[in-house]
Image: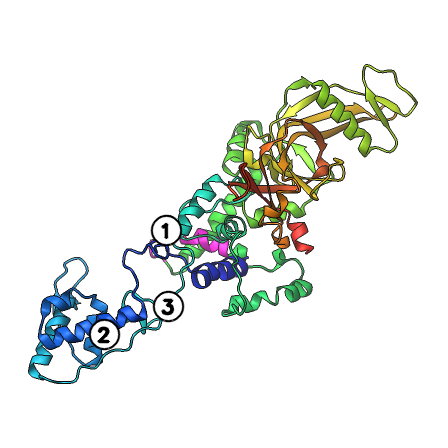
Amino acid sequence: MHNLFLGNLAHHIWNILGIDTDAQPPGKEYIKPHTTEEQQEQLDTAISAVKKGSKSSLMHLRRGYIVSLATADNVAPAVMIAKDPHHGDKANNSKSLYVDALIEWYEINPGAKIRCPKVFPSPTIDLSTAWGKKAKRIILHKGILQEVWLDMAKTRIPSWLNCAPANFGSASHGKTKADQWRTVCLINLTTIQLFGLGAVKTNNNHATQHLAECLRSFGPVHAWWAFPFEWFNGMIQKTGTNRQLSGQVELSFMKSFCRGSNLRALLLRDELPEAIQDYQSIAQEYFGTDFRGTLHHNLQAMARSADRFFPVLGKGKIITLPASQYASLISRLNQTSDTICYQPYNQPLEGAHCVHVEPRAETRRVIKLNGDNFTPAWRHVGNSQILLCATPLELEGSLAHATQIQKILVHSCPGLGRSSISETFFVVRLYRELDAAQIPLDPYRIFHALIAQLCIDDLEPEELIVSSTDIISHFTSCSIEIEGLKEQCRVVLSLNRVYIDSL
């Protein structure tokens, strides 16, 4: 994970794309870069001013031209030490000292040939430093980052994803973690091409090219990645040591870890002594499982149970389904069953394999799927955004349909004989899709590996009932305006990594 997210993604953001919250958009810089011709004009003016002994004319020029001219003619200014009680003494190399040195040098050597420094081949602000460092391209400048921050505020993501810092790119948010790099690069910056041709410049880039070979040789990455070590390193770094590094700290860490693990195992047991039963709820709240992040989410995704969906503890409210939802439920039940014919409760059964469908269901606020929360939109919009298979819904268009969960229902109905079948269903509304004339205006569909597309930022009025087996995955989305489309759109980005891995 660190090879991909911290090694590659962070490297490309910082070094390939370039990011600087202080850099202004091209043409809007506080100090305008000078072209090659403008640089030469400035240098000619400086040479003329030196010959005339005009200090005021030299002071009107940028420091870079003065320093470059002095360096080209081997003129060193007088060194003055500035007293700084907070940061210590340091040399003062102000522009005025270089100007004084140049004028004094020419007065001592009248008529001497003044060597003109070489201009920089591309626009630059400071000629004295342009040749001494590699010009760094800044694509993610302040203007782009401000747009990114606005989009990040509008983006809806499920709760199992770690949100990136709201002011990503600024030093004020501290160190960006690997999971946050994942969210930034794979979700918030999906419209930017991160990897360019010929960009293999680091060990991490090279190691990435051998990931397929490593997976075939060593199996799933969870068995051999270094994330647990990094995790514990982060915990240790936050722990005060009081400068005791003679073996006492290590022993204290081990004892505390064992005590905490034993206490957690004890308090989370099903059967506790009556005297400490009240502490179980406190322990569950304190040790509560956080499924956000790569490690936790991936492990839960692999730990598939017999029942993929199970409700969070707590009884829901019993409701009677409206006629339209009741009809949609019966239709969905009949689609998934080859042996039972489901009929409305107010109609006589038509055969031995027919059963009545209960018109009532129990609502749920949260349903878990392999550790991920699925909720109605009123509870958490990010957890309510799901992609549905098109085939079971008998819908046309794209392979997957973006929908929003309105209700979660647990419905029970009799099977053949005396058996009872309980299933989880979702009342959803579909996002309106682009019509045939609008699809060519979707800039995301040409990037097939991105698994993203546009839809209209509005929900269909009809409510459908779908089964848990119809769900592909969560998706993230962000509202956007597209030139040529009059209606507000929403970018839908699939989070289905199984489909991504199969590309």
Q: Quadrant of residue 489?
A: top right
Circles 1 and 2: CB distance less than 8 Å? no
Which residue is depicted at the point 27% across and 59% down? 31
Question: Which region is colored magenta?
Answer: 230-244
Q: CA distance from mark 3 to mark 2?
A: 17 Å
Relative to 426, say whether 145 is above or below.
below
Amino acid of disc 1: Gly
Looking at marks 3 and 2 on the same chain, the residue that comes earlier in the sequence is marked by: 2
Labelled disc at residue 18: none
* Colour mapping used in the image: rainbow
Q: Secondary structure at mark 2?
A: helix
Asked whether residue 165 is in view, the answer is no
Whether 325 is drawn above or below 440: the answer is above
The residue under the point 9% across, 84% down is 109
* Residue closest to the eye, 408 or 335: 335
User: Which quadrant does the N terminus fall into?
Assistant: bottom right
Q: Would you identify the image quadrant in which residue 322 lies?
A: top right
Q: Earlier in the sequence, mark 1 or mark 3?
A: 3
For residue 135, the mark is 3
> Mark 1 or 2 closer to N-term?
2
Query: Within 10 Å of the Cα at label 1, are there few (<14), some (14-19), or many (20+) other Cα atoms?
Result: few
Query: Which SS class for mark 3?
Result: loop
Left or right, 227 with reference to 236: right
* Amino acid on which the number 2 mark rests in the picture: Ser
Residue 126 x %, y %: 27, 67
Q: Is residue 466 left or right of residue 21?
A: right
Residue located beneath label 1 in the image? 240
Residue 236 on the magenta span: yes
Between 13 and 30, which is closer to the camera in this rendering? 30
In this rendering, which labeled residue sits more in front, label 1 or label 2?
Answer: 2
Q: CA distance from mark 1 to mark 2?
A: 50 Å
Give the numbered dot on residue 68: 2
